[in-house]
Image (spheres, grey):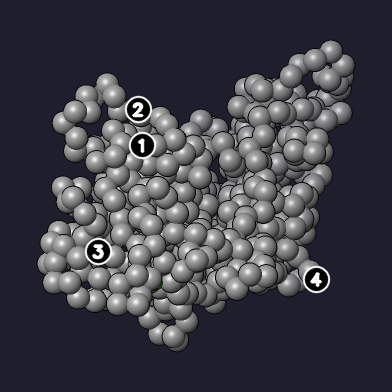
Amino acid sequence: MSEGIPAHHRIFFLMKKVVGFNLLIHLVFLVSFAEGKPAPLTLPAQTPLLARHFLDLNNVIMASLPDGTLVYNVFEVALQAMEGSESAGFRTIKREKGLIPRIATPQPVLDDPYQFAAFKWLEDKAESIGDDGLIWYYRFDNVYNDILTQAPWASAFGQAYVVKAFLYALLQTGEEKYADLATRAAVPFFMDVEDGGFQTKLIDGALFFEEIPTIPATHILNGHMISTITLLEAGKQLGSTEIYDLGKQGVETLIHHLAKYDLGYWSRYDLNPKKGELIFRFVPDPHLQESPVLIDSVSLSTVVGGKRIDLDVGALDDTRGAWRISGTEWTHIESVNKKTVRGIQSGPAKHCGPIKGGSIQNSYVIMQLPVLEFEALSDISDFLFHINYFDQSPGFLNIEIQDVSHGGFMGFRTLSQGTIYTSGSKSWKSAYIPVKSSDLAWYVGSEYQVYHIKLLKKLYLLTGRAVFEHYAERWQRYLDMHSEVNVEDSLSVRTDCGESKVKKSQIQKY
Ligand SMILES: [Ca+2]
């Protein structure tokens, strides 16, 4: 059951702050305006994947936080309920002397006493919600990307596995009690996030099940898919048209919105955009002897509303602050027509492969969004990247952005409409390049690409809808084409660089 589920779910995935019944999303940026430009946005420490597990005195699995605190992960307890001592987290438990408590289980309803212990925990820890509903809370703070959730919080993802556990127990024992528990555990899927449940609406009113029930919701794809699958299965097994129909609504949402999660080379995790430390890269035609352009300034602006971030290239502070240039291929500051400018050298002409801590072409522009908060994440307008430059010699310049499928400097993608052709007219020009919200997606590891495909295949089996098979095949192709090797190697155009000279892993995490 746990096979194929990305490891990060073992410990975190949902952020929600409960203040009375108000939910608050927290963007935990540390912004300082001390020196004109603010300091770069910094992310809070992420709640890490924790490999160490322990058993409590009742034989229920616990995970260790970085400070050593032991916590329950609802998802992992549900896995234990279904798989007993065979569950993945369980196998990592260090079976030191004294750590394994006495097993004293009164008449287990399921064969494995570890399963019984997990079911008992699920029954004991269930809390009431809504009309006869039940919900399971995570009781530790969690950070994921730029969002902090304070305990207690609950998750459509974790709770889907609780429903699955009760369906499993019903199948094994035939006890009516488990049908009742599964039905009640499905209740929060009918409730809005505002009311403590899991539902939000996309811009067209489509219903979404939130792994992270924040406002604005982040719309995590895998959480919605596993919820949809579980509701379809529960509806069938429990004979509940109501629950099955809710699953069908989840299916319709996917059919209409899966395209939002397709980046053309990888899938997207959620709809929350990266807001700061956006790494663009300016890549000149590698065959040119001199820079085709001299850059005076760049800016990132909203299409409407007139909000913008301006970076004066050639200013004395152009390498510092939240928006800045970086990298060894920028030339020194020059003055042209009283404007301060810098050119860009070709990296492949200088290096045979990626330089340590960078790539083969190190001419980066690091920017921040001109707005940091959004009312709805499912409908973020494009931004415009505006480049003022002196057209120095004929050629081209590609404007790239860091991709989401590689860490660090390992991969960049040219922005749509991101090529500037130069003629050598020796005149000042401007280029406007759209930056879409999909360009701003966060890093997604291949384990999630694999998990997305697995869930799509399951949805195809359950519904027979061809769109799921189509996306499963498409995303499998992305996975097949993906390489963990630095995708920059192919940029080298030097014939004197033998293949063996290209070092493939001189990469550090940015
Ligand atoms: Ca300038």
Q: In front: 435, or 84?
A: 435
Quadrant of picture, ligand 1? bottom left
Q: Which residue is mark 3?
A: 293
Q: Amino acid at mark 2?
A: Lys
Q: Position of residue 147 (x, y in %)?
A: 63, 59
Mark 3 → mark 1, Cα distance in angstroms: 23 Å
Q: Which residue is mark 1?
A: 354
Label at residue 503: 2
Q: Residue at x 40, y 85 (%)?
A: 304
Instruction: Look at the numbered discs 2 and 1 and tell me whether their residues touch, using CB distance below 8 Å.
Output: yes
Q: Earlier in the sequence, mark 3 or mark 1?
A: 3
Label at residue 20: 4
Q: Quadrant of residue 390?
A: bottom left
Mark 2 → mark 1, Cα distance in angstroms: 7 Å
Mark 4 → mark 2, Cα distance in angstroms: 55 Å
Q: Residue at x 23, y 76 (%)?
A: 429
Tell us which disc is closer to us: 4 or 1. 1
Q: In front: 115, or 263?
A: 263
